[in-house]
């Protein structure tokens, strides 16, 4: 009889230890995944910094609104006079850099959606990243222009949910403007 009771107690303890171990394993995996996602996001922002360094001619796209005009003036001095064809090539490259910024935005929206099912801390982190993008990064005058339908129409390359999020979260004030002329102070109409 004692043997049966001891067996039941030991079996119950084994089940409790197994449940606890499984719970700890899931928690550790979720924490590792969260840490990896945060590291990946910072790696993406480091890539933006490298993009700025390697494509200094387009660094105006990565400036906060308060630094935009100053950086634009510096670039206008630094860039040599260009032919119409050279300007067109520059504008194509500028669009590519801007597209990379907007792709990071859409990727972050997907990540916050996926994280919502798993971890509230990651949702909060991605929410902070999106808040920075929509309240600072996307108020860059040239990015505003390149995203807009009246300007560069880059918004057309993105999901409807991405466009809706952008439209509802990028709030422009009276001091916000779209820079349609870019570095060359004239429009090349598309």
Image (cartoon, grey):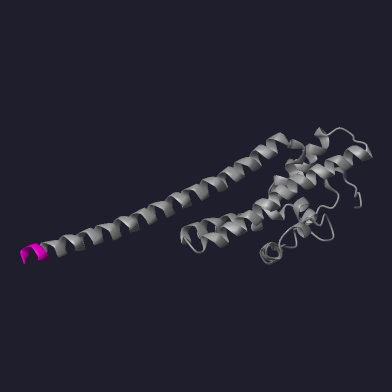
Q: Residue at x 70, y 55 (%)?
A: 138
Q: Residue at x 71, y 65 (%)?
A: 160
Q: Position of residue 162 (x, y in %)?
A: 68, 62
Q: In the rendered view, would you say 78 is above or below 110? A: above
Q: For the view shown, which residue lies furthest in the right direction?
A: 84
Dominant secondary structure of the residues highlighted in magenta in the image: helix
Residue nearer the viewer, 137 or 72: 137
Q: In the rendered view, would you say 34 is above or below 172? A: above
Q: Is residue 179 visible?
A: yes
Residue nearer the viewer, 16 or 80: 16
Residue nearer the viewer, 26 or 130: 26
Q: Position of residue 57 (x, y in %)?
A: 77, 37
Horizontally, residue 9 falls left or right of residue 103, namely left
Q: Is residue 20 magenta?
A: no
Q: Position of residue 73 (x, y in %)?
A: 79, 40
Q: Which image quarter is the N terminus in?
A: bottom left
Question: What span is colored magenta in the figure?
Answer: 1-5
Q: In the rendered view, would you say 14 is above or below 41? A: below
Q: Position of residue 13 (x, y in %)?
A: 20, 60
Q: Is residue 131 visible?
A: no
């Amino acid at each position: 009889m004692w043997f049966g009771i001891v067996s039941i107690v030991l079996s119950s303890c084994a089940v409790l230890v197994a449940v606890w171990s499984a719970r700890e394993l899931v928690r550790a995996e979720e924490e590792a995944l969260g840490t990896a996602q945060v590291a990946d996001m910072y790696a993406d922002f480091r890539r933006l910094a490298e993009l700025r360094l390697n494509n200094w001619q387009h660094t105006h796209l990565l400036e906060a609104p308060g630094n935009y005009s100053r950086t634009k003036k510096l670039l206008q001095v630094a860039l040599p006079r260009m032919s119409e064809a050279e300007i067109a090539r520059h504008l194509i490259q500028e669009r590519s850099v801007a597209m990379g910024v907007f792709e990071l935005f859409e990727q972050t929206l997907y990540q916050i959606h996926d994280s919502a099912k798993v971890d509230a801390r990651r949702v909060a982190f991605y929410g902070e990243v999106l808040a920075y993008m929509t309240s600072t990064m996307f108020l860059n005058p040239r990015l505003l222009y390149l995203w807009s339908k009246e300007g560069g129409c880059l918004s057309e390359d993105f999901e409807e949910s991405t466009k809706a999020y952008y439209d509802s979260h990028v709030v422009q004030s009276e001091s916000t403007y779209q820079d349609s002329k870019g570095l060359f102070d004239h429009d090349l109409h598309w």
